[in-house]
Each structure stands twice: as structure tokens, then as C-alpha cells.
Image (cartoon, rainbow, N blue to C red):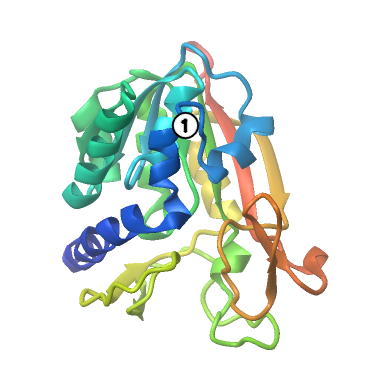
Amino acid sequence: MSDDYRILNKANWDERAPAHAASSDYAVARFVADPEFLSEVVRFDLPLLGDIRGLRGVHLQCHIGTDTISLARLGARMTGLDFSPVALAQARQLAETTGAPVDFIESEVCDAITALGTAQFDLVFTGIGALCWIPSMDRWARTVAGLLRPGGRLFLREGHPMLWAMDETHTDRPTVGYPYFEMPEPTVFSSGTTYVETETEFTHTVTHEWNHGLGDVVTALLAHGMTITGLVEHRSVPWEALPGQMTREGNGEWRLSEHPERLPLTYTLQARRQLAGRE
């Protein structure tokens, strides 16, 4: 596979990072003003995430670090990893300003073991909108398993593959327009917008993305010595993913205005690396 997708996607995220940091949607000012403030994403995760105090954790595809710092505020010893140096500059600045003891490392996700070492972490955390940038769930799952100590835990909340399969340009009703299953070749998009409110006009607008069905994700994790411990599908998502069809709730989440029971929007998957002798 050509590396063109890496170059295009990195340029896109390098350009997005300053606009995201300046947007009220990422609430950077609130992180600075309130040492107990947590991102809306992590607050949503809390009931399933549970107590993470004392765990050594890594947040893959951490972007500008707001979720990573939130996890550190919950007591985990966090490292954030991302391929965008511009995003990491924003993350490091926020960590320094807030006094958050978080290390940020520049690396592609699937090179994370080389960058961080094998079996170094109790927790791998991955947030919404991460997996669509990765071509192969098999390679990703191998990386996750390799980063975790035996008994270590994966916590993944992600956009549901049914949501990613929807064509958001149809504003009257949900319409399937893209692949549900992982495909060898990416879906190519060109968009000058992003998922937060900003007046920035982007110039690096082309991205290459992949969907991964639930079966693709689960099968890959099982193949690399992980045991699935939880799978919950949710009726909400943290941004207006289908414009004109959604209503915002009080916790910052959006759900379908009509028949929200008809379409899962996100899911939380948890898994553990099998203990030594059981792999």
C-alpha cells in the first residue's frame, strides 16, 4: 500500500490542530481554569472506565491531549501518542500550563511498540474517531496487545461502523453510502470543514479513511491474545454526525431526533490481554 495516505492525513491533522485548540468545543480554557475539569468524552466514559488510579496508561491517537490530561486527572500515569507534531505541540503546551504529568510521543500508531516498548502499560485508551485512520485492524490489534502487560486492559469508545457507513450529505434520513466492512483500499474524502466550530479555512482537505465492522475489530483482538470483556452500543455521539437529523443532549452528546433506537452511533469495547500461560 502506498504511503500517500499517511502524508495526506498528517497534513490534514497538522492543519486542524490549532483550530481545534482554539475552539470552545475542546474547552482548553476550562482545563486551565479548573484543575478538576474533565473532557466531555472522558466524563461519558466514566461509568464503564471505572477507577484507573495508579495505572500506567497510553492514549493512542491523543490529538491535542485533552482526553489524555483528563485521564491523568483521574489518577492514571499517562502517555499520549500521536503522529501530528503540530497536535503534540498543542498537547504539550496544555500539559505544561495545567501542570499535568503527561508525556507526549510522536509516532504512527502501528509503530507504537518501537516508540514505547513492549508490555509497558496497564491501560490502552483509544477515543472516538481514531480507527478510521488505520488501514488494518489486524496490525492495530497486534500493537494494542504488544503494548499491554499480561492482564492489561484496552478501553475503546469509537464511532459505530454503522454511523461511519452513513452518507451525512443526506439530511432528510439516515442513508447508507459507504462501506461497513474493512476494505483494502480507503474511502477518499475531500472536505474543508471539521467537527468543531471554527472560521479557519483549511487547505489540506483530502483524507483517506477506512471503516472497520465490529466483527473486524473483535476478530483482530481475539487473534492477538485479547479477551473481550465488554461491548456496549450507544445511541449518542459527541458531535453532530448527521446534520439536520440530530438533537444535542445536556451532556454534550448528540442523538437522532427521530427513532434513535434505529441506529447505533458509538460503541464501547473493552478487552484484556490474556495472562501468561493462557495465550
Reply above or below: 207 against 160: below
Name the residue located 32 percent from the left edge and 46 percent from the top edge: 64
Badge 1 density bin: few <14, some 14–19, many ≥20, Cα 10 Å: few
**Residue at image location 35% in from the left, 79% down from the top:** 191
Q: Callout 1: helix, strand or loop?
A: loop
Amino acid beneath label 1: Asp
**Quadrant (top left/top right/bottom left/bottom right) for the N terminus:** bottom left
One can see residue 224 in this view: no
Q: Which residue is mark 1?
A: 34
* 112, above or below 119, in the image: below
x then y, percent, for residue 163? 60, 67
Q: Nearer the viewer, residue 250 or 133?
A: 250
**Which residue appears at 50% of the width and 51% of the height?**
128
What is the residue that sits farthest to the front in this orientation?
33
Against 259, residue 104 (above or below) is above
Quarter of the figure with residue 93: top left
Q: What residue do we see at 31% from left, 23% from top?
A: 99
How many numbered markers are drawn?
Answer: 1
Give the answer, above or below, for where 105 lies relative to 8: above
Horizontally, is 55 left or right of 175 in the view? left
The answer to whether 231 appears left or right of 23 in the picture is right
Q: Position of residue 193 (x, y in %)?
A: 37, 75
Residue 44 rendering spot, x and y as whole percentages:
63, 41
Task: Using the rendered image of the protein, determine whether residue 216 is visible from the camera's viewpoint.
Answer: yes
Expressed as whole percent of the image width and height from the top left, the position of residue 245 reads 68, 78
